[in-house]
Image: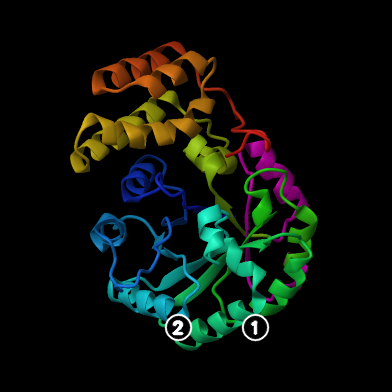
Amino acid sequence: MKFYFGPLEGVTGYIYRNAHAAFFNNADKYFTPFLSPNQHGRFSSKEINDILPEHNEKIVAIPQILTNNAQDFIRTAKQLKAYGYDEINLNLGCPSGTVVAKGKGSGFLANPGALEVFLDQIFEEAVTKISIKTRIGKDIPEEFDRLMELFNKYPMEELIIHPRVQKDYYKNTPNMDAFKKGLEQSRHEICYNGDIFTTKDYEQFNHAFKDVEMMMLGRGLIANPGLIGHITEQRALDKEVLRAFHDKLYMDYQSVLSGDRNVLFKMKEVWFYMIHMFSDYEKYAKKIRKAQRFGEYEIAVSNLFKEQDIVKDAGLFSSKESV
């Protein structure tokens, strides 16, 4: 099985990706948070920092593009090619209301005619390999049949399927019947994405879909940065390694961000997921959330690591609790 680290806006930027690779080094690809082409045709300074080759030297980084404009995609692909990237991912999965309202992300799935015109153009002008990350539709799973017919027309690198519709966001359970159907219909390599939080989740999936050789992990891997090692080598997450990973992340954010507030905001986003790996974490989570200064934060984190244990194969959220 190949494992991909899925993108999460605000969390899995280059600082996080490099810290994860430094201590866990077992993701085959890291997908960047999406780049959104703008009317000026230029990357923002934040986007440039995230895709600079020197910020992704020791990992395989795959830039992700979010757009419904073929010319914007083509222009951005050429810019990324100039940076040395030979694979780009198209985001047809983002369920955010603001994104969907603009007909982008999973909102694009509601208009297969326009999507077909878009795909015709970007594959005709392709300067890199193109993979696609998709949901199974916008409103109902029955939309997926038409989408699979469409996807099968193009020479994509791989198709990453998150088997929920846009309206599900991250609630309800993944529609495995739809995933199975898509797997049977596809002429492409398929990567699975959705609700793999524990080794048990992985084993259940692997038992049901033995022919699937690629898996994208997202929230589950942010919660447990050692999840891939636990799956592949039965190596439980080590508290000392997790602490070292945390400390590198914390220090590296301080090197590029100014002020306690900005750094702590980034760390709190990570802790929203990672805190679930600890026993009796509630009071520590509250103190981390309330921390406004480095000193307060460091005491809360130090006490958490000192006083609580890592919970073996802890689950992240139930589907009802997922964000």
Residue 58: in magenta span: no
Q: Is residue 131 above or below residue 244?
A: below
Q: Can you see residue 92?
A: no
Looking at the picture, how far across and down is residue 244, in whole percent?
33, 30
Q: Residue at x 73, y 44 (%)?
A: 204
First in residue order: circle 2 vs circle 1: 2
User: Viewer-proximal residue, 68 or 53?
Assistant: 68
Magenta segment:
183-211
Q: Residue at x 52, y 27 (%)?
A: 277
For label 1, the SS is loop
In space, the residues marked 2 and 1 are separated at their CA atoms by 15 Å
- 10 Å crowding of disc 1: few (<14), some (14-19), many (20+): few
Looking at the picture, how far across and down is residue 32, in whole percent?
41, 57
Q: Is residue 244 above or below residue 27?
A: above
Label placed on residue 153 = 1
User: Viewer-proximal residue, 321 or 312?
Assistant: 321
Q: Can you see residue 14?
A: yes
For label 2, the SS is loop
Q: Residue furthest bottom?
A: 124
Q: Amino acid at mark 2?
A: Ala
Q: Amino acid at mark 1?
A: Lys
Residue under pointer 2:
126
Q: Is residue 51 left or right of residue 116?
A: left
Q: Residue at x 48, y 40 (%)?
A: 222
Q: Residue at x 59, y 41 (%)?
A: 231
